[in-house]
Each structure stands twice: as structure tokens, then as C-alpha cells.
Amino acid sequence: MVTTHSTEQNSEAWLAERVGKFTGSNAIKLLRYGRTDKARVQSVEFKGNKYTQRGHDLEPFAISAYEQVKEVKVERPGFITNDEYPECLFSPDGLTEEHVIEVKCFGEERHHKVRKDIPAEILAQIHFGMLMTEKTKAHLVMFNPDIDSKRALYIVPVKRDKRLLARLDKLMRGVQ
């Protein structure tokens, strides 16, 4: 069963919920290191940087632009749990009835590059989210308001990778 939790993202309670869990942000580590402590959230201290802050600042504008273009309402829960994956927690940037929404607010060069070639860590995060939410579709929302308005928003449909999903599923369940 999928459960939506309203705990505010980045709050002390949200940070505490993540400790010891496998998360979407660490999905690439789960793939690289397996079910080890390297792949689990280790601390309530979140070590962001100026790029993390940029993402936090711009994400609401990206979601609003997405809602306008797609004519949908985006839900923004604190985190998702799924009984199938008791050691996992997923904090989506947004959810629609059909889609997991992952927002990235990179600088101009990476903004254009990523939309054409999505890095493994982003694909892992999105597929982790599809498993946790039991949704079959996802959009990567690329947003950069510092460039011309025609290229500031890219909505990239993410193709389901059955092999990646199967690998993550086994790791998330603890199946050898």
C-alpha cells in the first residue's frame, strides 16, 4: 500500500524520517553499493550547497509552469512510503494522477544537456519514485528562468526502463 505523508520537506521531522532509509536521492548509491550503509541516509544533517538552494527556490515556479502547460494540478506531498519497500522513503517534487514529477533547475549549459541525455543518477531517482508511488509514467521538468522563455521550461517524458526497475525493485526489497 502506498501512503502519502504531509510532513514538510526539509523540516526536522522530514529529515529524521529519512535516517537509515534508502531514498530517491540515494537511488544511484543503492545501485552502485547495494544494500549497504553507503546507500542509506546517515544523518539528519542535510548538506546542501548553492545549487541545492537554487533548486529549492525555483521548484515552486517550475511546478507552476508545469501545471499551466499540462493543465493539471500537481500534488506536493512531504514523502511517500510503500509497504512493499519498508526500508525506503521517497520525497517527490510532485505527483499528478498519472506522473511522478522530478524537477531540476540547472544552469544554462546543463539545462540543455540533461534534457537530451539524462544522467544515471536522475534516471535512478525517477525510477525509484515510480516504484514507490506505483506510477507508470514520469516527467523530468527542466526549469531555468534565466534564459529565454521559449527554452526556460523543458518537460521530458522519461521512458520506463524495465531492467532498471527490476534491479531497483530487488535492491529495495532486499531480494538477492
Image: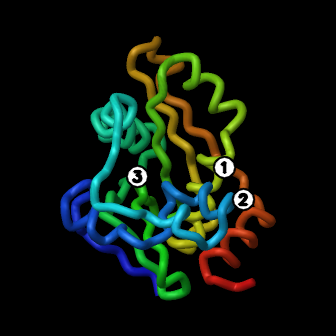
For image coordinates 49% across by 48% down, the residue present is 102
Q: Position of residue 13 (x, y in %)?
A: 20, 67
- The CA distance from mark 3 to mark 1 is 15 Å
Q: Residues within 10 Å of mark 1 (few under 14, many from 20)?
A: some
For image coordinates 56% across by 44% down, the residue present is 140
Secondary structure of the residue carrying tag 2 is loop
Quadrant containing the C terminus in the rendered view: bottom right
Q: Position of residue 37 (x, y in %)?
A: 52, 68
For image coordinates 50% across by 69% down, the residue present is 22
Q: Write down the residue under mark 3.
A: 93
Q: Residues within 10 Å of mark 3 (few under 14, many from 20)?
A: many
Secondary structure of the residue carrying tag 3 is loop
Verify CB contact (< 8 Å) between mark 3 and mark 2.
no
Which residue sits furthest top? Answer: 148
Q: Write down the residue under mark 1.
A: 158
First in sequence: mark 3 vs mark 2:
3
- The CA distance from mark 3 to mark 2 is 18 Å
Q: Write down the residue under mark 2.
A: 160
Secondary structure of the residue carrying tag 1 is loop
Identify residue type, mark 2: Arg
Quarter occupied by residue 156: top right
Picture layout, residue 169 above or below residue 98: below
Which residue sits furthest left? Answer: 12
Quarter occupied by residue 84: bottom right
